Amino acid sequence: MVGELASNYSTLVLMFGFAVVAMAPALLVSRMISPRKKSNPVKFLPMECGQVPSGEGRTHFMMQYYAYILMFVVFDVMAIFLYAWGSTLLLLPKSATLPIIGFLAIMFAAMAFALHQSGRRDIW
């Protein structure tokens, strides 16, 4: 029982060990070559494209691409699931078509909402 449980988690432990072994040298090297003294205090100020920031940090954000971002997310998720469904289409039973039609209906409803939002000018 214990050996069987250990063999189930051996891959996970091996991956975690590899992550630690790969991460430790990178952290050590970056620590060794990082500057230790603060020679010029201007270097450590917050900069905005090389210029000292002026004005308030919080401003009105233009939402003109909000609908396109929503549509990208919808199509991105849709493509992932449609690719997985389409690659096994010949092996699936015919009853597997109904859930994908429901999924497409939900995704197209989200896209319709995004298109509706793109027509609203009060979110801009």
Image (tube, grey):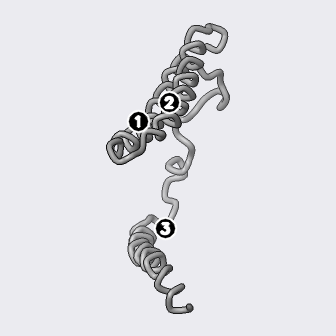
Quick check: can you spot residue 51? no
Identified by mark 2, the residue type is Ile
Quick check: can you spot residue 103? yes
Q: Which residue is label 1 attached to?
A: 79
Q: Nearer the viewer, residue 100 or 63?
A: 100
Which callout, 2 or 1, points to the residue nearer the camera?
Answer: 2
Tell me residue 83's x, y (percent).
37, 40
Q: Which residue is label 2 attached to?
A: 101
Assess whether mark 3 and mark 1 are in contact (beta carbons under 8 angstroms). no
Quadrant occupied by the C terminus: top right
Up-down: is 82 above or below 42?
above
Lateral position of residue 121 relative to residue 73, left or right: right
**Of callouts 3 and 2, the N-terminal one:** 3
Q: Residues within 10 Å of mark 3 (few under 14, many from 20)?
A: few
Rounded to the nearest whole Å, what is the CA distance between mark 2 and mark 1? 14 Å
- Residue drawn at (45%, 30%) of the image: 75
Q: Residues within 10 Å of mark 2 (few under 14, many from 20)?
A: few
Rounded to the nearest whole Å, what is the CA distance between mark 3 and mark 2? 60 Å
Q: Nearer the viewer, residue 64 or 60?
A: 64
Residue 51: which numbered mark, if any? none
**Of callouts 2 and 1, the N-terminal one:** 1
